[in-house]
Amino acid sequence: MFARNEFYNNLYKAIGSEVSGTYMGTPFLGNITSTRMKYGNEVQVSVEDTITDETYLIDGDTLLEGGNGLYTNLHVYFS
């Protein structure tokens, strides 16, 4: 439980940090442009791909677990 709380605290203030992974089999690398609190204790981040300008909305639990089916091989590089 402590690791999840620490991860969420870091994630909530991670604007500018890099995220890499794949979305539906397509690799991406982008920066976190915003974070927001969702229902309960969930955090959601907006990630803008640095090459294609696509925006991905990714939940904190998905980042913590490294994927969820649509997203795979997720990594957050806190700055």
Image: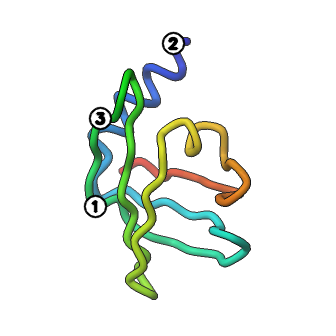
Q: How far across and down, in percent of the image, does residue 27 sit?
A: 64, 75
Question: Which of the image's four quarters has the N terminus?
Answer: top right
Residue type of the residue flagged with mark 3: Met
| Residue 33: numbered disc | 1
Numbered disc 1: secondary structure: strand
Q: Is residue 15 left or right of residue 59?
A: left
Q: Is residue 16 left or right of residue 64?
A: left
Q: Quadrant of residue 61?
A: top right
Q: How far across and down, in percent of the image, does residue 19 sit?
A: 49, 60
Q: Is residue 16 above or below residue 8?
A: below
Outermost residue on the bottom side: it is 52
Looking at the image, which residue is at 42% across and 79% down?
54
Q: How far across and down, in percent of the image, does residue 78 sit?
A: 41, 48
| Residue 37: numbered disc | 3
Q: Is residue 27 left or right of residue 52?
A: right
Number of residues whose C-alpha sits closer than 10 Å to that of mark 2, classed few (under 14), some (14–19) or many (20 or more): few
Q: CA distance from mark 1 to mark 3?
A: 14 Å
Numbered disc 3: secondary structure: strand
The residue carrying mark 2 is 2
Residue type of the residue flagged with mark 2: Phe
Q: Are marks 1 and 3 in contact (CB under 8 Å)?
A: no
